[in-house]
């Protein structure tokens, strides 16, 4: 009724907002429970980050504890190994964002090139099996392969490629490679599932049109497949950038040992050893908050760049 | 379609309603104890109360105690589950006591924090570390116990004995009860090992010094360079997880053979020096370095975890061992007995001790009498006296027997209900005795430990002491009695004689946050630097790495830490008299 | 796709196929070998296995490891709870995340950016364990089944996946349906969902497996054991070694070591956890291995 008689271009801002709500009311109605859900389960507990600014002890309310401001942050940053922790963290997460990120994509493209559907399914199924092996078990497998008496060293010595066994597990310089490969082995198959499903969503007619235009198989991958799944790739990568200060935790406790510690000690393992494990929650929360702020800022900036360059954005 | 929209909204609405509704239905934890009857005293005049065969005065109303077991990672085998049921049964029937145990599958301290944060902790928190106890005291959630102990806990006091002043705070108040207080001063915890049959093969030469041990191991290696399967052998190997199991948390337990007490050199004026700055510590590292430069040490010695070390050991690939006294049992003859077709009695490792010539004594095993964990009665407890009287029972000999040996009498095993197992028995008059068959099995080391889980020992232990009982023979550990009947144990005690000392005064218990961080940093530092020195390629490199090690420890703040430990030591010495 | 009639067969293509095949063969060997190793271990005697040297076949065959796991009396009920959790959690999760993905990919929807931002922030910021735990208590989720699926219903990650997939779908389909008077829910259920089957299959797998594997929330919220899942029972077995790390007293350590189940039981539990997934997976796999034709749906 109201809608018909008013000239909306000259109507006030409020009326315009009301109109947009009204026309899209169905979507807003659907959003409402979702907003309630996320406010309750995700935003309400966020008051916990305040722990980082107090000397919080469980058993006492946050505000009853002593307020220390940025003390925990300062202490964490000024500890002598901080730069080393940062170095290790960035090194391993960078490897993850490059090698670890691109491998599943390449693997899924290779998978789609397999002709027999049965073989394709079999290979794909086998590839995700390591995902189900816990890190404890995976660690013993790594040891089996890389220890001084392990499979790799025995092979190398038998083939006369080396005289003495290579200390893969006790020399720090090898650690980043060992970690990246172990992580890749464990997560590759699982991560390809998403890319396979994205590739599967590409309309077959596009390939038919491409064939008519004279594209070979490589051409189809370059000009049809990849551009079609590019949004998924870019968005997942932007999300991944936000996790640049996360570089594993459990893996290091299992794959690492004191000999390689100055290569595997990352922000999380340090904060666990000196924070949570000793019961100092506040320190752990402070480190976590720092990572959150830095991570999200990176995501925000990368998102803007992506919107400008590629017209793809997370939000 | 509107119907669809409506149904979606309905579903969401239902969900919300559900969650709110559930709130009023479910209770979050088991009810907390509230009993209001008079506390039990040993001089009760009430004729209605009976005394059961264990000497416990059975209360008229069921005593319910709820306790949180903070040990975490809680898991019971099928035998243990049955054992717990058996224990619950006897507690209810003969004691009129119900014990509600709260446990967690994850980290015990993490869950304790959640209980504290939500305010739903029970009246008793036990099996908890001293750090947690200090935190609970700080939060004001613990009840003071000296009065209750005086009235109802005389047996507890007797069991703690001379150590009692060490458990009081500065104002002479008692806020917790230790579990496992005391020590078996003749049982060594750590030792070096050599294989008995191989040792006899080379003529059983005397091992008195570290160099003797080195030579003996290498003689054996020369004599038997390969395993029966043809694989190469190493003289020595180590494992780094659990780390403290080889070297102790502060490192340098291995230096005990060189006269260092758990990482500290004690001077005559009671001043302390941390082991990297002592001759003994350096000598110990150099000794390990000898193995390394000789090429007979396992290259993965610092990468192995226990399972990996055990795998090599069980395949006879390692000739010698240094560490806990039992590791060669678990990885050695206990495995070989079951899988080796050529097994014979002598194919086992025995413990040997030695002493560096310049050391005053071989301080290999430091006995800490404080106990392994603690019990706290929280402010949720309505009647501290009753809880203390229950704990007091656990300090008496029938109580120790019940909770640490298990339920008395013959019980069917889990796997075969027709087979019965019994560790001890107690008759109506209160006279108790250890079962002869089990005693024989324990002495001959053929006792079926997993099957004994049906006896339900180890549950609900709120207090215990590990000293010998009044008769000087029995103790809470089933397999640590009658050494004289077990030739291997006798050998163990004999060989390690003189290596055990009382470490209690040196234990630093009161730690502020900065001290804890200091300690963690020092532990981190020695764990990273000591292996480097051990793996030096030659003398020059060793000196360089040793100095680097010392500098790293200095940078981690050892001077401040030493000062604090020393102060604590001197205070404790005075207090213990 | 490779064998479709319109693809030309070339020499380089065949070479590539051979190399691809070879590489993938080696690759699968690398992936499957550890699993076969674990399978072999699970059928081996525990004490014998501790000596190492088991590669592809058990040396001392026994089914005692499986017998030990299955002797747990509550195993059947826990398996039932696990299945219930996976079914409820996956159905609700897929529907909810797909709906959310649809909402935030409607090009003209003004709340799009806000909703996305709202979710993405939660990917990086979190209050931690204690506030979440207190919230669950307040909602009455302790010892309740609902704690398994309600708090994890929606996720920013799945929102990104579904929305970027749906954005690829031709908007004209939706527009014409709107013009015809269809409600958003109709468009979602009748148009979007059928076209998004590969993506739905993918997140169904992810959500389903994450529910199947979850144990931490079970250990926190299922206190009286009523809602124990299969995973928590198996986790208890797998995690025994952790408990020992804290014990320093040699006597206690030795006694506890005696009760620990050997790695062969751990291997058996890994197999028990993985095998159901391997059986169910092919039902979902076919949706994203073969691909679909939008044209066919249109017609």
Image (cartoon, coloured by chain):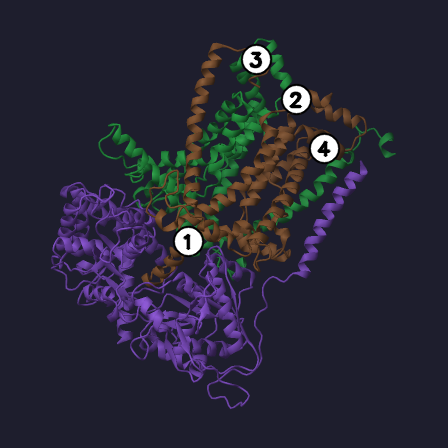
Chain colours: A green, B purple, C brown
Secondary-structure class at tag 1: loop
Disc 1 designates what residue? C261
* Callout 3 touching callout 1 (CB < 8 Å): no
**Depth check: A141 or B419 in front?**
B419
Disc 3 designates what residue? C7
- Whether residue A177 is situated above or below residue B447 in the rendered picture: above
Instruction: Tell me the tag on residue C65.
Output: none
Chain of the residue on which disc 2 is drawn: C
How far across and how far down the image is residue B101, in percent?
51, 66
- Whether residue B66 is situated above or below residue C220 in the rendered picture: below
The first of marks 4 and 3 along the sequence is: 3
Measured in 3D between alpha carbons, the distance from the residue under mark 4 to the one under mark 3, in whole angstroms, is 34 Å
Measured in 3D between alpha carbons, the distance from the residue under mark 2 to the one under mark 1, in whole angstroms, is 52 Å
Decide: few, some or many residues near mark 2? Use Cα within 10 Å; few <14, some 14-19, many ≥20. Answer: some
The first of marks 1 and 4 along the sequence is: 4
Relative to B95, B174 lies left or right? left
Secondary-structure class at tag 2: loop
Instruction: Tell me the tag on residue C293.
Output: 2
Secondary-structure class at tag 4: helix
- Whether residue C163 is visible here, answered yes or no, is yes
């Amino acid at each position: 009724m109201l809608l018909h008689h008013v000239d909306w271009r000259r109507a006030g801002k409020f009326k315009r907002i009301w109109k947009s709500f009204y026309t899209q009311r169905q979507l807003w109605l659907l959003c409402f429970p979702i907003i309630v859900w996320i406010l309750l389960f995700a935003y309400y507990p966020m008051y916990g980050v305040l722990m980082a600014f107090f000397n919080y002890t469980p058993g006492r309310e946050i505000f009853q504890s002593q307020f220390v401001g940025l003390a925990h942050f300062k202490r964490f940053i000024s500890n002598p190994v901080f730069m080393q922790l940062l170095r290790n963290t960035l090194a391993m997460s960078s490897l993850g964002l490059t090698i670890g990120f691109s491998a599943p994509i390449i693997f899924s493209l290779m998978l789609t090139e397999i002709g027999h559907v049965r073989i394709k399914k079999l290979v794909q199924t086998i590839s995700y099996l390591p995902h189900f092996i816990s890190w404890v078990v995976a660690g013993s497998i790594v040891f089996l392969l890389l220890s001084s008496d392990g499979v790799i060293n025995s092979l190398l010595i038998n083939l006369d490629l080396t005289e003495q066994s290579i200390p893969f597990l006790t020399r720090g310089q090898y650690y980043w490679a060992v970690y990246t490969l172990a992580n890749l082995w464990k997560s590759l198959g699982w991560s390809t599932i998403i890319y396979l499903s994205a590739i599967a969503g590409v309309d077959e007619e596009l390939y038919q049109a491409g064939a008519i235009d004279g594209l070979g198989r490589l051409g189809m991958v370059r000009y049809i497949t990849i551009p079609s799944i590019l949004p998924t790739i870019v968005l997942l990568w932007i999300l991944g950038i936000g996790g640049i200060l996360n570089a594993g935790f459990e893996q290091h406790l299992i794959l690492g040992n004191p000999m390689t510690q100055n290569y595997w000690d990352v922000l999380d393992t340090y904060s666990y050893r000196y924070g949570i494990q000793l019961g100092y929650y506040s320190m752990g929360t402070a480190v976590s908050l720092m990572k959150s702020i830095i991570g999200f800022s990176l995501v925000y900036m990368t998102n803007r760049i992506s919107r400008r360059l590629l017209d793809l954005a997370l939000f | 379609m509107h119907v669809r929209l409506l149904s979606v909204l309905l579903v969401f609405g239902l969900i919300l309603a559900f969650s709110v509704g559930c709130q009023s239905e479910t209770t979050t934890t088991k009810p907390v104890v509230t009993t209001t009857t008079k506390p039990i005293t040993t001089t009760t005049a009430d004729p209605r109360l009976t005394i059961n065969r264990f000497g416990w005065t059975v209360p008229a109303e069921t005593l319910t105690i709820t306790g949180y077991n903070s040990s975490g990672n809680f898991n019971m085998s099928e035998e243990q589950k049955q054992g717990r049921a058996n224990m619950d049964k006897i507690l209810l029937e003969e004691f009129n006591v119900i014990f509600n145990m709260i446990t967690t599958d994850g980290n015990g301290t993490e869950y304790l924090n959640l209980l504290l944060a939500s305010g739903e902790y029970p009246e008793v928190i036990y099996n908890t570390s001293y750090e947690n106890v200090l935190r609970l005291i700080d939060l004001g959630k613990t009840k003071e116990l000296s009065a209750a102990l005086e009235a109802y806990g005389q047996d507890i006091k007797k069991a703690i004995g001379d150590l009692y002043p060490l458990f009081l705070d500065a104002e002479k108040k008692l806020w917790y009860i230790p579990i496992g207080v005391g020590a078996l001063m003749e049982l060594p915890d750590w030792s070096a090992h050599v294989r008995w049959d191989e040792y006899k093969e080379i003529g059983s030469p005397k091992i008195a010094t570290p160099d003797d041990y080195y030579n003996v191991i290498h003689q054996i290696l020369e004599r038997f360079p390969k395993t029966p399967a043809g694989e190469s052998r190493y003289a020595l190997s180590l494992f780094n997880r659990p780390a403290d199991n080889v070297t102790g948390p502060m490192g340098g337990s291995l230096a005990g053979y060189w006269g260092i007490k758990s990482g500290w050199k004690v001077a005559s004026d009671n001043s302390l020096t941390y082991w990297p700055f002592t001759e003994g510590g350096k000598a110990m590292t150099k000794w390990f370095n000898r193995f390394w430069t000789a090429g007979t040490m396992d290259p993965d010695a610092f990468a192995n975890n226990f399972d990996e070390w055990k795998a090599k050991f069980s395949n006879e690939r390692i000739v010698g061992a240094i560490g806990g006294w039992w590791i060669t049992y678990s990885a050695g003859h206990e495995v070989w007995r079951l899988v080796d077709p050529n097994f014979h009695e002598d194919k086992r490792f025995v413990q040997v001790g030695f002493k560096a010539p310049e050391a005053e004594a071989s301080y290999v095993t430091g006995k800490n009498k404080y106990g392994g964990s603690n019990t706290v009665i929280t402010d949720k407890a309505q009647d501290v006296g009753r809880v203390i009287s229950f704990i007091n029972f656990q300090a008496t000999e029938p109580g120790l027997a019940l909770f640490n040996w298990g339920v008395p009498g013959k019980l069917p095993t889990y796997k075969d209900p027709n087979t019965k197992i019994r560790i001890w028995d107690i008759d109506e008059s209160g006279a108790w005795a250890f079962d002869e068959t089990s005693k024989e099995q324990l002495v001959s080391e053929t006792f079926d430990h997993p099957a004994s889980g049906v006896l339900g020992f180890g549950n609900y232990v709120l207090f215990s002491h590990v000293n010998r009982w009044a008769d000087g023979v029995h103790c809470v550990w089933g397999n640590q009695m009658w050494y004289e009947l077990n030739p291997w144990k006798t050998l163990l005690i004999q060989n390690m004689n003189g290596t055990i000392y009382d470490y209690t005064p040196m234990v630093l218990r009161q730690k502020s946050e900065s001290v804890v961080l200091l300690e963690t940093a020092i532990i981190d530092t020695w764990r990273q630097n000591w292996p480097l020195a051990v793996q030096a390629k030659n003398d020059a490199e060793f000196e360089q790495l040793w100095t680097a090690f010392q500098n790293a420890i200095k940078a981690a703040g050892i001077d401040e830490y030493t000062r604090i430990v020393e102060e604590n030591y001197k205070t404790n010495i005075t207090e213990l008299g | 796709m490779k064998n479709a009639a319109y693809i030309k067969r070339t020499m380089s293509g065949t070479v590539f196929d051979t190399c691809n095949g070879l590489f993938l063969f080696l690759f699968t060997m690398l992936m499957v070998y550890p699993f076969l190793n674990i399978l072999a271990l699970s059928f081996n005697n525990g004490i014998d296995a501790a000596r190492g040297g088991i590669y592809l076949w058990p040396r001392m065959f026994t089914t005692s490891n499986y017998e030990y796991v299955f002797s747990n009396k509550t195993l059947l009920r826990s398996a039932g709870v696990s299945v219930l959790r996976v079914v409820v959690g996956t159905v609700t999760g897929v529907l909810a995340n797909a709906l959310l993905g649809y909402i935030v990919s409607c090009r003209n929807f003004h709340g799009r950016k806000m909703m996305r931002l709202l979710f993405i922030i939660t990917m990086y910021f979190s209050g931690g364990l204690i506030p979440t735990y207190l919230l669950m208590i307040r909602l009455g989720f302790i010892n309740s089944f609902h704690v398994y699926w309600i708090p994890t219903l929606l996720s920013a990650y799945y929102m990104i996946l579904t929305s970027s997939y749906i954005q690829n779908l031709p908007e004209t389909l939706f527009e014409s349906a709107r013009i015809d008077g269809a409600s958003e829910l109709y468009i979602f259920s009748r148009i979007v969902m059928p076209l998004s089957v590969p993506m739905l299959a993918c997140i169904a797998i992810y959500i389903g497996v994450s529910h199947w594997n979850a144990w931490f929330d079970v250990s926190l919220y299922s206190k009286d054991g009523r809602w124990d899942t299969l995973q928590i029972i198996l986790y208890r077995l797998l995690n025994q070694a952790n408990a020992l790390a804290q014990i320093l007293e040699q006597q206690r350590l030795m006694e506890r070591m005696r009760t620990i189940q050997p790695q062969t039981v751990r291997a058996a539990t890994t197999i028990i956890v993985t095998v159901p997934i391997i059986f169910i997976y092919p039902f979902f796999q076919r949706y994203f291995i073969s691909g679909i034709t939008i044209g066919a749906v249109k017609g």
